[in-house]
Image: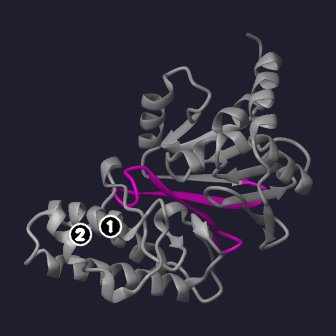
């Protein structure tokens, strides 16, 4: 099957099957925009060299996302940087790859996408890295740094150095509650906090923070988020002296004093279980 036919098939599958999503683009600088849609927040960097993006949401939205990007600058992104392997951040990899984009991600993201999609899949990163990588493009240095065992085992944080903007992926859920620590994919509470403390120390009061989910943020709000995660950690650890099993922990309801909002896919019971499982191992 040649390249043109593959592109047509991808468009037919993803272009017409996706329900309408209320996309919204937020301009941060002349070069950096954030695209809000359904799934992880997408950073779009445009300039004289072309376009590149951070994350690409769900596969079914690829055609619509391409339209949103082309409204800023016509053409396909040269690069797609994945912050981790979850489908709401990597679902568009195949469609963008078939359109000529080069996907960049951590080595563990490559391994997990191979396991999920196969060794010959267009979902796979063309470039993978171990600890850090710098993309020199559009007169900007995008510094990509891996943080081990945080949200997952393959998290990458992207810092647009000149613009003083950082895309944190799902290390930062700016939804007023607690994060999803994917324990089954190498994530951990302590690893997440270690990463958050490292990142926040490099920010200043003018830094712009793009979370994986939620509104664009800043250093002060990120500090509040870190304090919230630390409070939850302390409550779970204290409860572990009285609740010996995961079931007992859920019944004990140690997170209730925080009075936080939760979502249908990440209810308080699941957050409690994940924090408990992580801290019990650590």
Q: Residue at x 46, y 77 (%)?
A: 177
| C-beta proximity under 8 Å, tags 2 and 1 | yes
Question: Left or right: where does residue 198 sit relative to residue 174?
Answer: left
Taking the magenta stretch, the answer to whether it contains residue 159 is yes
The spot of residue 235 in percent (x, y) is 23, 82
Residue 151 sits in which quadrant? bottom left
The spot of residue 191 in percent (x, y) is 31, 65
Distance (Cα) linking label 2 and label 1: 6 Å
Residue 182 sits in which quadrant? bottom left
| Any part of residue 282 in sight | no
Dot 2 lies on which element? helix
**Residue on which the image places disc 1:** 269
* Vertical comparison of 232 with 18: above or below: below
The spot of residue 237 in percent (x, y) is 17, 77
**Residue on which the image places disc 2:** 250
Local crowd at mark 1 within 10 Å, few (<14), some, or many (≥20)? some
Work out whether mark 2 precedes mark 1 in sequence or the reverse, and give the earlier one: 2
User: What is the image's colouring?
Assistant: one colour
Question: Left or right: where does residue 256 sit relative to residue 114?
Answer: left
Taking the magenta stretch, the answer to whether it contains residue 221 is no
* Vertical comparison of 180 with 233: above or below: above
């Amino acid at each position: 099957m040649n390249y043109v036919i593959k592109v047509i098939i991808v468009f037919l599958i993803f272009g017409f099957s996706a329900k309408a999503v209320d996309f919204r683009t937020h301009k941060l600088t002349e070069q950096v925009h954030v695209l809000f849609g359904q799934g992880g927040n997408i950073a779009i960097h445009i300039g004289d060299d072309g376009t590149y993006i951070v994350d690409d949401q769900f596969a079914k939205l690829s055609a619509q996302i391409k339209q949103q990007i082309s409204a800023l600058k016509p053409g396909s992104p040269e690069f797609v940087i994945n912050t981790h392997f979850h489908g709401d951040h990597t679902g568009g990899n195949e469609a963008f790859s078939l359109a000529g984009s080069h996907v960049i991600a951590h080595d563990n993201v490559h391994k997990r996408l191979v396991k999920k999609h196969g060794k010959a899949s267009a979902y796979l990163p063309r470039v993978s890295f171990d600890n850090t990588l710098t993309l020199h493009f559009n007169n900007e240095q995008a510094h990509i740094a891996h943080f081990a065992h945080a949200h997952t085992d393959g998290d990458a944080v992207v810092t647009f150095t000149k613009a003083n903007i950082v895309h944190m992926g799902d290390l930062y859920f700016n939804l007023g509650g607690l994060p999803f620590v994917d324990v089954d994919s190498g994530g951990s509470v302590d690893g997440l906090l270690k990463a958050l403390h490292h990142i926040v120390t490099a920010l200043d009061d003018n830094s712009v923070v793009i979370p994986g989910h939620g509104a664009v943020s800043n250093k002060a709000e990120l500090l509040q988020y870190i304090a919230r995660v630390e409070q939850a950690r302390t409550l779970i650890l204290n409860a572990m002296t009285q609740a010996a099993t995961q079931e007992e922990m859920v019944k004990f309801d140690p997170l209730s004093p925080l009075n936080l909002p939760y979502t249908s896919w990440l209810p308080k019971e699941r957050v409690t279980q994940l924090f408990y499982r992580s801290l019990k191992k650590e």
